[in-house]
Image: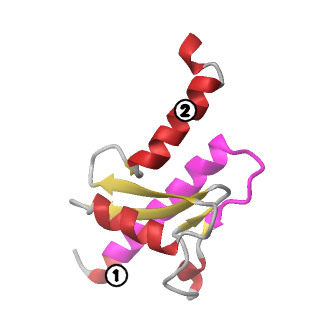
Amino acid sequence: MGGASSRRKGHQFERDVANMLREVMPGADIKRGLQSRGGGAEEMDVECPYFAVECKKGPMPNPRAALRQATNDAKPGKVPIGVIGDDRKPPFVVLSLEDFLGFVKEWWHAGGKDQ
């Protein structure tokens, strides 16, 4: 696949991720990052509250690279996540164990243990 085609596929994946986040965070200010409009490489792929989102789409995207980039580019207070879209497979999220355990702890103390 050529460079322009890969970029289009990546940009569409970023739009799809932004739309999915809008569905679960109604009213939140969620948009693709400035790099999609010629801004800077240090911008996140998807700008949203709480998360620093780096998207990777392709035949076998590198989840570690996505998380590393999200971690490097995250603004203070944002949880870095990588959203990985393997071709023809369901997307998945990668985050640090520390951040995941923080979510589990919050869920547990909010009553998740009673479910």
Task: Kindly identify the residue that appears in the image at 44 percent across and 47 percent down.
Answer: 98
The reply to whether residue 108 is in sight is yes
With 53 as the anchor, is 49 left or right in this view? right
Mark 2: which amino acid? Lys
Q: How is the image coloured?
A: secondary structure
Q: Quadrant of residue 77?
A: bottom right
Mark 1: which amino acid? Ala
> Which numbered marker is on residue 105?
2
Task: Kindly identify the residue that appears in the image at 65 percent across and 60 percent down.
Answer: 48
> Horizontal and vertical percent for residue 101?
47, 39
Tell whether position 18 is magenta. yes
The reply to whether residue 115 is in sight is no
- Circle 1/circle 2 CB separation < 8 Å: no
Q: Secondary structure at mark 2?
A: helix
Is residue 73 shown above or below 99? below
**In the image, which is nearer the foreground, mark 1 or mark 2?**
2
Q: Nearer the viewer, residue 53 or 30?
A: 53
Q: Residue furthest top?
A: 114
Crowdedness of circle 2 by 10 Å Cα count: few (<14), some, many (20+)? Answer: few
Q: Is the C terminus in the top left, top right, bottom left or bottom right quadrant?
A: top right
Q: Is the N terminus in the top left, top right, bottom left or bottom right quadrant?
A: bottom left
Residue ID for mark 1: 4
Task: Kindly identify the residue that appears in the image at 34 percent across and 81 percent down.
Answer: 4
Tell whether position 3 is magenta. no
Q: Which residues are magenta?
A: 6-31
